Image (cartoon, helix red, strand yellow):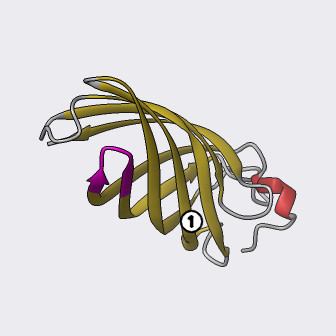
Amino acid sequence: MGVGSITDVLNTDRIAFETVHGVRISPYAFIGLGAGFDYFYDLAADAAGQSSNGGAVTAFANAKGYYPISGGASVYLSLDLGGTFGVMNLMKDRNDMYASVGPGFSLGRAGSRQRFDIGVRYQYMGENTGAVLFRVGFEF
């Protein structure tokens, strides 16, 4: 069963999990690699009117540029670039570019092992699959 029209996936509900691992190379920069899984539910209706779902795996590189505003706080701009690969049901045949960009706020000293980040991103996973994400991160 195919998606039908690409517009069927516009404004879909999803649950996403992502993890990024990398290194803060200075008080001003972070680089890392990330992976995630997006579970799309209520994606489209089949011929019987039943909704279906789909899943996609993402793999990406992440870079953040920090601007310290005090000894323990920084604002940053984050950029993710990579690919998204459909792996389940209605998303199975969808492979495309993955990108996200947006600002954030980080608490905790650059050399500290414990930090808290919160940010907002615009995410692109292919034609008509954009989303606004709120990300919360912990470093330990």
Please, what is the dominant secondary structure of the magenta stretch?
strand
Secondary structure under tag 1 reads: strand
Relative image position of residue 73 (x, y in whole percent): 33, 24
Residue 88 in view (yes/no) = no
Q: Which residues are magenta?
A: 24-30
Q: In the displayed structure, would residue 66 be above or below residue 108?
A: below
Q: Residue 55: within the magenta?
A: no
Residue placed at 26% from the left, 24% from the top? 72
Near-viewer residue (57 or 81): 81
**Residue 43 versus residue 36 in the image, above or below:** above
Instruction: Give residue 24's position: percent from left, percent from top.
Output: 28, 53
- State left or right for residue 124 relative to residue 68: right
Residue at image location 23% in from the left, 39% down from the top: 110
| Point 46% across, 67% down: residue | 61
Depth check: 18 or 79 in front?
79
Residue 99 visible to an observer of this rendering: yes
Please count the marks in the image.
1
Q: Which residue is mark 1?
A: 81
In this rendering, would 10 be left or right of 32? right
Q: Amino acid at mark 1?
A: Leu
Q: Quadrant of residue 128?
A: bottom right
* Vertical arrangement, residue 53 with respect to residue 118, above or below: below
Q: Quadrant of the N terminus?
A: bottom right
Q: Position of residue 51 (x, y in %)?
A: 67, 50
Q: Residue 124 lies in what quarter of the image?
A: bottom right
Identified at 28% across, 59% down, the residue is 21
